[in-house]
Amino acid sequence: MRARRIEETLFKGLMIISLGLVLTALAGIICIVVIKGASALSLSMILETPKGGYYLGKEGGIANAIVGSLYLAFGASLLSIMISLPVAFAMQREYTGHFAANCTRLVLDILWGMPSIVYGAFGFVIMMYFGLRSSLLGGIIVLTLLMLPIMIRAMEEVIRMVPLELKEISYSLGTTKIETTVSVVLRQAMPGVITAVLLAFGRGIGDAASILFTAGYTDYIPRSLLDPVASLPLAIFFQSATPIPEVQDRAYAAALILLFIVLLVNIVSRILGWRSSRYIVR
């Protein structure tokens, strides 16, 4: 009995230490970005596109990167949702065999752990084969491939947690599998589905390696899917690599904008998740 108490106390201490380290690292990152980025942040930086000599410390802004990141992230998220939800439902035992579902999970787990630069290289090779140049469409497709494993696996785990009794009650009322899936299962799993979308969105909007060669970079806001597009991660990378201190400070300001966008999306998703959780049967 005493050994169990010692073991429990030890693991509680390790959990508290781990939590403290994570929170300390998070607070440190946020503080550095806010302190260094707030001084360089201005309204013109948010609303204007880069002008001549911007990367040498002259006037301009990163509106092209802000709009480009939103285009890429929201476009890839929308496309990923359209693909992930049907796949996540199809992986349930009542729709596919147990062996097929396990094989799909294994493949998705492998893709989840694959470095994002591999997705970028794959997309670049495919684009070169078809003679396509870097564009908004290419960036959206590659980000979709990057986000799919995260979104599908998270959605599939949430859907599996829906009580079997609810499905059986729905079937007993004469509904079909499709009607039960849409009216019962999806509504019960909606908070978890929103969280899955948020996880994938967070990785997509902050990734630079996968879109470096597929989306390109430009000082202009794209007007079509075939135009190259800038992004905040690449803007941060290019500005932080310059030897000019003023431009390096702008990189922290760009990071602060990216942090604000992710925080805003988190808050909105939590509100939507809270509103949808009222329909959950506990």
Image (cartoon, helix red, strand yellow):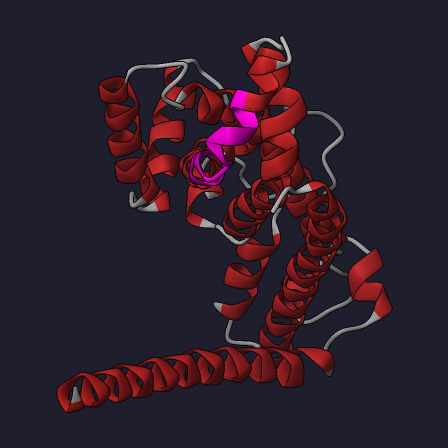
The image quarter containing residue 175 is: top right
Residue shown at 44%/31% (left/top)? 145
Q: Position of residue 152 (x, y in %)?
A: 45, 33
Decide whether the magenta segment is chiefly helix, strand or loop. helix
The foreground one among 262 and 55 is 262
- Where 176 sits versus 271, above or below? above
Is residue 83 rendered to the left or right of residue 50? left
Q: Residue furthest left?
A: 3
Residue shown at 58%/40% (left/top)? 193
Residue shown at 34%/42% (left/top)? 112
Look at the image and say whether residue 80 sits in the magenta stretch: no
Residue shown at 67%/63% (left/top)? 263
Q: Position of residue 174 (x, y in %)?
A: 62, 8
Look at the image and say whether residue 165 sits in the magenta stretch: yes
Q: Quadrant of the N terminus?
A: bottom left
Q: Position of residue 222 (x, y in %)?
A: 72, 34
Is residue 221 rendered to the left or right of residue 55? right
Q: Which residues are magenta?
A: 156-168
Question: Can residue 135 be seen in the rendering of this structure?
Answer: no
Is residue 138 rendered to the left or right of residue 17? right
Q: Position of residue 97 (x, y in %)?
A: 29, 15
